[in-house]
Image (cartoon, grey):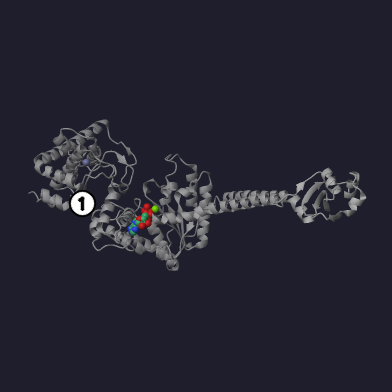
Amino acid sequence: MVKYGLRLTPSFMKPLSKNLIILVLSLVVIGTIFSAANVKREAPPETIGVTALVEKINQDQITKIEVQEDTLSAFTADNTEFSIKKESNESLSELLANYGVTPEKISKLQIEVKEPSVGMSLLRSFLPTFLFVIGLSVVLWLFIRQMQGASSRAMTFGQSNAREVNNKKNRVTFAQVAGNPEAKEELSEIVEFLKTPKKFVDLGAKIPKGVLLMGPPGTGKTLIARAVAGEANVPFFHISGSEFVEMFVGVGASRVRDLFQKAKKAAPCIIFIDEIDAVGRQRGTGMGGGHDEREQTLNQILVEMDGFDPNLGVIVIAATNRPDVLDPALLRPGRFDRRVILDRPDLKARQEILATHVLNKPIAKDVDLKRLAERTVGLAGADLMNIVNEAAIFAARRDKKEIEQIDMLDAIEKVIIGPERKSHVLSEEERVMTAYHEAGHAIVGHLLPHCDDVHKISIISRGRAAGYTMSIPGEDRKMHSRQEFLDEMAMMLGGYVTEKEIFGDMTTGASSDLQKATAVARDLVTQYGMSENLGPRTYGQRDDMPFLGRNSHESRDYSEKIAEQIDQEMAKLLSDALATATRIVKDNRPKMDQVVQALLKHETIEKEEFITLIGPAVKAPKISPKPAQS
Ligand code: ADP
Ligand code: MG
Ligand code: ZN
């Protein structure tokens, strides 16, 4: 964030300095013209006609006349100067004689004939032309330079602008990548290939050509790829898939050619193609408009990967968060046949990631990374880095010398839920409504055994939410039981139920709760086989990977009749959840009023205070095998 301003300066300077040169130049030119025009302007002598001159001569006022070409300068005894113009084909004496000045008077005059000053007059006559030519050449020069720039840019259009990074300063090593032990292990093999290829070649082993890094955004794919290059200490060519896709067909393919050529010269090295799904989408599916350019680029990548000798030491690493859309040709042996998965970090990994990011920051003693890791379930490495950065900003704005736990906690909430909106003032009525709504979530969640622990309740608006209840699972779990889903749905409906029970009315504030609850109900029925009537099968095919957390599109593989049943089952699950929540809200009205009073007074309640108000949470019994039936 802070570095950004620094980085701006150089690119800003360039046009500025160019403009500055032009400005100075034009100032000089203008100045010269003015000063040239101003030469000898200081005290121009009075200009008189020939008749007047003759008169003055006849009165003996003039003592001296200087002739310079067609200009006469007449001086009186007290050195006053007069200027007179004459015709050029007439000499001075002829002129005076013609005007009837007697030879006697002429002989009294001191006449000096001056050579015309060559330099001065030349300069005067040529200066405008000279300046004009200079001006013209400057303009021409700028113009030509621009043209050359454009043409040389056109010439390098087909070249890859892959950046080669391998300097000591920003060298990344595995030590900077926290967590992901399996990925690091897989990739340290690649490091060894790059360091000592001979060992493998001697045994007849083929060094892999391509490694595909897969994982959700922000899990450190780019980081770990750079770490591989850093560990092996080889050049690293970094290019992003979208850089291949240009306006002109064929550019992508020629950039690929150029990239591989550069890499072969620099071998052993790493080519890193970031976001390869931009070019590597399945061909011929028509998805994304059947882009010709992309297909050509992809073909070229395949050709190049097949083309080079595996033992050359060029390893292509590609990263994507959409492995499901990649063309199968990319994934076959001999291409990206090695696959490394980077998953969202678990509790321990999150703690490690936080630790690497606080390393070079002043951290107060009260900062408890484990507690922070607990509060950041589901976040990726990039989010955690962001949290530490936000915490540093909070600490700085609060004029602290060290980052404290409270800054970290505030940063987590800012990143997860959104920035606090102090200006978003709720009316008293809305405040009370929000307090009851959140208290409803919290109490239902607290009293149902399978819900996550309530860590915080707040009626301060953040992001789009008027208030929020923060509940966090005690541990990272890969599996969820049916009962957990049922309790979770009840908790989601807790706010809605409370509004209905306490006020006899409902607000729009519950709409996202309803969406979430509906989605859970749908998954229960269609994905997990957890409904009683529809049984153990899935409904609808989703072609995505589960860890992407997004269903791109779903194709229906069931009948209308089943669709109706699904709706019924979902409605039943939701109405059961509603009943559960309603029961709890009705039974605990006095406690709820207490929580609401506390909320209205303090705006937020932490876990400890909540428990003193409402008693300890109900814990789920441990699941154990049923006894055998005889
Ligand atoms: P991706 O390429 O997977 O989207 P990046 O590699 O760009 O993610 O990660 C963004 C930033 O998040 C990194 O620069 C790093 O600071 C941080 N980060 C992500 N994962 C980790 C990790 N495992 N350990 C340390 N930092 C990480
Ligand atoms: Mg990346
Ligand atoms: Zn709610």
- Asked if 114 appears above or below 175 in the picture, the reply is above
Residue appearing at x 40%, y 58% in the figure: 225
Residue appearing at x 28%, y 35% in the figure: 558
Task: Name the quadrant of the N terminus.
Answer: bottom left
* Quadrant in the picture for residue 50: top right
- Asked if 374 appears above or below 481 in the picture, the reply is below
Count all numbered tags in the image, as a single digit.
Answer: 1
Reading the image, the residue beneath label 1 is: 473
Residue placed farthest to the right in the image? Answer: 103
**Is residue 54 among the parts visible in the rendering?**
yes
Residue 566 in the image: x percent, y percent?
23, 35
* Quadrant in the picture for residue 317: bottom left
Answer left or right for 598 relative to 72.
Answer: left
Residue 81 in the image: x percent, y percent?
77, 51
Residue placed farthest to the left in the image? Answer: 630
Residue situated in front as seen by the camera: 466 or 133: 133
Residue placed farthest to the front in the image? Answer: 59
Are there few (<14), some (14-19), or many (20+) residues within 10 Å of tag 1?
some
Residue situated in front as seen by the camera: 602 or 241: 602
Residue 210 in the image: x percent, y percent?
42, 56
Answer left or right for 272 relative to 587.
Answer: right
- Asked if 219 appears above or below 521 in the picture, the reply is below
Answer left or right for 330 relative to 97.
Answer: left
Which type of secondary structure does the marked residue at label 1 adopt?
loop
Residue 320 in the image: x percent, y percent?
39, 51
Answer left or right for 139 relative to 314.
Answer: right
Q: Amino acid at mark 1?
A: Pro
